[in-house]
Amino acid sequence: MSMSDGRTSDTKRGTERLVVIGGDAAGMSAASQARRLRKPGELEIVAFERGNFTSYSACGIPYWVSGDVPDRDQLIARSAEEHRARDIDLRMRTEVTEIDVPGGRVRARDLETGAESWTSYDKLVIATGARPIRPSLPGVDAPGVHGVQTLDDGQALLDTLATTEGRRAVVVGAGYIGVEMAEALIKRGYEVTVVNRSEEPMSTLDPDMGRLVHGAMEGLGITMVNDAEVTKLLTGDDGRVRAVATEDAEYPADVVVLGIGVRPEATLARAAGLPVGDHGGLLTDLAMRVRGHENIWAGGDCVEVLDLVSGQHRHIALGTHANKHGQVIGANAGGGYATFPGVVGTAVSKVCDLEIARTGLLEKDAHRAGLRFVSVTIESTNRAGYYPGAALMTVKMLAEQRTGRLLGVQIVGREGAAKRVDIAAVALTASMTVEQMTALDLGYAPPFSPVWDPVLVAARKAATAIREGAFR
């Protein structure tokens, strides 16, 4: 077993070394940005990735599984070879197993040979991502049960789908991944059941908005089982999964996909004594430095972020945030300066042609933050009502009762619905009131919107509710 460092000559030259743990969005964005700012003779960059792929879109995996994206390589933004051509020493299939903060070094294991070695660092980036929640249930590790977080996971699922004779699939969980995987499996010709512990699918929406998603999923032929807790996964004589059991029923399954959600992968950081928050993610400052550590940064799905609406910290696993974190980290590690102020919690998804979007706080979030608020829901259309293709859109809006400050928006509808949430995301970032929103100068033409955009209709209704409440 090798435990060498290989650092002496670099130290004599005075070359700094940046070590990056994690080769996906945050880690490689940081490495690439640092390389733009510092030449190889000034900064050596070593990156470790335990998987087979780097710089890929995990968000695209459901669309690859469904067949909408035919080639796995279309999800890879930059290959390991391309990173190496930019003077980044990217070591694939190599897992960092320990961070020695006092010694300024990391221990890594080559997953092909088992060889271990220490690598010193002057600056460290932790971008270890998130891990799928895999409940401790009987049968959860049986063949045919899949989590979907990495390209390797997606390939393993596709291999199972290609070799499994039965056509019955059960998806456990109805968040973004669960809903998107249910649609993907329907497109693959499977009979799909979704078992969901919540009142309605998409717990990132309020239940009344989740009900609209429920209806769309059933319209696709998906069987929805809500308010149900999985108790075990049953296996056959061959050891493969054969059913998912709840307290009340069993649902036959030739393949099971776990779509329960993810947690920050901060095991290494926690073992090294680095600070983690209530949600299990690393805590950083505005420059994405790990709190209390001048030369250690963290970003992506392994960190907690500041919610600009509630003022509280949250864990939100999205590639948009990870790439921004990486840019900020790379700028700072490369000798520049940048900050990441926080998020408002914007996300979009779809079920077939039904678009789903949210930003800001849900009702339960507002209650948890101790806010008093009004909540309004409106129905409008995505285009002028007389224009061909006009379809219904439902917009729900929350505003602070006393100030009228926008708190959150949820939108469910057809074409053109989801990206309207960006109007609200900007308004939230600017701390606008719903009254101010009613005067926004948005684009209008019959093919794109009614005269009053649905978001502005909701803002008018919320502003009215606040005024009427003031006179009670």
Image: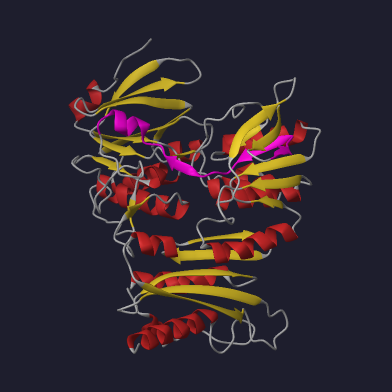
Q: On screen, 471 above or below 159?
A: below
**What residue is at 61 percent from the left and 63 percent from the top?**
211
Q: Position of residue 365 (x, y in %)?
A: 39, 60
Q: Quadrant of the C terminus?
A: bottom left
Q: Nearer the viewer, residue 30 or 255?
A: 255
Q: Nearer the viewer, residue 236 or 88?
A: 236
Q: Would residue 144 appear left or right of 371 to someone viewing this image?
A: right
Q: Nearer the viewer, residue 220 or 69?
A: 220
Q: Would residue 70 appear left or right of 467 to someone viewing this image?
A: right
Asked whether residue 267 is drawn in magenta, I would say yes
**What residue is at 54 percent from the left and 32 percent from the top?**
52
Asked whether residue 333 is drawn in magenta, I would say no
Residues in magenta, as a range: 249-273
Could you say which quadrant of the image residue 85 lies in?
A: top left
Could you say which quadrant of the image residue 294 lies in?
A: top left
**What residue is at 43 percent from the left and 81 percent from the top?**
462
Q: Position of residue 300 (x, y in %)?
A: 39, 46
Q: Would residue 162 appear left or right of 6 to someone viewing this image?
A: right
Outermost top residue: 1
